[in-house]
Amino acid sequence: MLRPNSYAGKLIVVEGIDGSGKSTQIDLLYKWLQAQGRSVFFSEWNSSDLVKSTTKLGKKQKMFTPTTFSLLQATDFAERWENLMLPMLKAGVIVLADRYAFTAFARDVARGVDAQWVRNLYSFAPQPDLVFYFRVPLDVAVERILSSRSKLKYYEAGMDLGLADNRVASFRLFQQRIINEYDRMVEEFGMTVIDGALPVQRQQKLIRQMVKKVLDGWQGLPNPRAPQKRARRHAARTAIPAPVGDGKGGPE
Amino acid sequence: MKKVEFYGAGFPYLKIKELPGRLIVLEGTDGVGRSTQIQLIRKWLEDEGFAVSDTGLRRSPLTQPGLDAAKTGHTLSRLTMNLFYATDFADRLENQIIPALKAGFYVLSDRYFYSIIARDTVRGADPEWARKLYGFALKPDLVIYLKCDVPHLIERMVHGRGFDYWESGMDVRSADNLYDSFVVYQTRLIEQFDRMAEEYGFVVVDATRSIEEVFQDLQREILKLEDV
């Protein structure tokens, strides 16, 4: 149980294994909300500049243990939470997160750390207003990942666990463990399950319906760059307003 | 041999059957003489033929570069810093302390996670959260708390290395000068240590006495471990 979101803003999160299609969906959602003149902010897992050098060093030298990996990712999250997400939520912004504490609950536990311990680590983070969990059959996700990159990385493939000698085989076993953890969390954290094997547009339609419900009757921080009401349809088609936030823009 | 025990879940993926070495921790605020005593203990134990390894806070090869950069830049908020320190502590525990204990070493630790919790609590962190965070920590065989009051600490600072920004807790902003800030900050730290002494069963040693007297007490406590 995470504490409820008591801030002025809304927090919407996507979760799922690599290749589940969550980043594509959150990118579409981000653009859609912007086009409506909403104040939106996007943050991505493991993207804090501060922790980057340590993460790079640890990965390169294979220095991580499940516990230090977990703690370092929590440090990364805490940095983004304190400096980016929390101020945005307090300001009344819609914060979209590509992965959240649940990624740690799934991956770190799949790596062997204690489930209660990692939940305590992230107890400063509130329960999002919506959590979309993109569920796909393992084969579909693996196919998507392997076709889009040349080689699986050491930690990505879960090679540190010694599940298999071969990276693809290890990746499959590791991802299956993560799926099992996610499935266990659906009820615990009230996740909305999205079938990641559906056509992209169909998934996006379901997501927008859910988001609309959450935003119904809620105002949020006005966006001075938002298109005027009357001109909205036209503006949305021709220009996408600049993102609110750090100016780095939305998801790639 | 003592059972291998952790404060919480430990490292569930590590199958540790036994640790033949001994983990001895010296705790206490800044300037109580921890490093001097560790040098003396180390020499004494090595003269007796024991293998000794010593370790302190913030010496992990994984996190040292990042932590040094963070400390100079003042860019880390409290929560982030707490987690970064915990990463460092876990790295040293898994990659230095536990392997040394497996090999039968005496491991002398200049502070342990208790100091981190004390500093964090003084800065307003949730003490319960921090205690659960360090649930991976191994229970030491012996924790010696070198207890010293503020007047004695001031004497040592004045005749020693002088007042320092961090040791005076200037970041907490309880006073506008090093001296007053030192008094307030160290008083609060000592309160935290006193509380933990009871909670975690520290052996309290009066550190206001001479180096030699304190060392004799430490030797006596360490010899007790060998009698078991």
Image: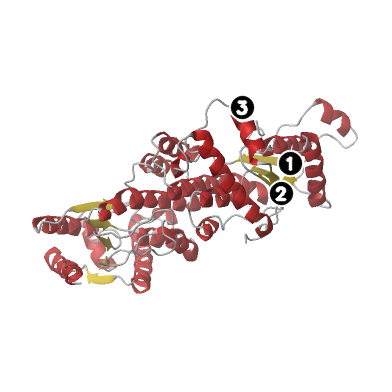
Q: Is residue A107 shown above or below B189? A: above
Q: Which residue is nearer to you in this view: A149 or B92?
A: A149
The answer to which of marks 2 and 3 sits earlier in the sequence is 2
Identify the disc placed on residue A92: 2
* Extreme residue toward the bottom, this view: B198
**Do the residues marked 1 and 3 share a common chain?**
yes
The answer to which of marks 1 and 3 sits earlier in the sequence is 1
Q: Which residue is nearer to you in this view: A104 or A241?
A: A104
Q: Residues within 10 Å of mark 3 (few under 14, many from 20)?
A: few
**What SS does tag 1 mark?**
loop
Residue for badge 3: A148
**What SS does tag 3 mark?**
helix
Q: Is residue A201 left or right of residue A42?
A: right
Q: Is residue A29 left or right of residue B142?
A: right
Residue at horizontal 18%, vertical 71%? Answer: B224
* 2 or 3: mark nearer the eye: 3
Residue type at numbered disc 2: Gly
Q: Chain of mark 1?
A: A
Q: Is residue A234 shown above or below B227? A: above
Q: Position of residue B167 (x, y in %)?
A: 33, 55
Quarter where residue B107 is shown: bottom left
- Cβ atoms at labels 1 and 3 below 8 Å apart: no
Q: Which residue is nearer to you in this view: B107 or B152?
A: B107
* Extreme residue toward the right, this view: A230
Q: Is residue B162 visible?
A: no
Residue type at numbered disc 3: Ser
Identify the disc placed on residue A39: 1
Q: Position of residue B87 (x, y in %)?
A: 42, 49
Q: Is residue B66 visible?
A: yes
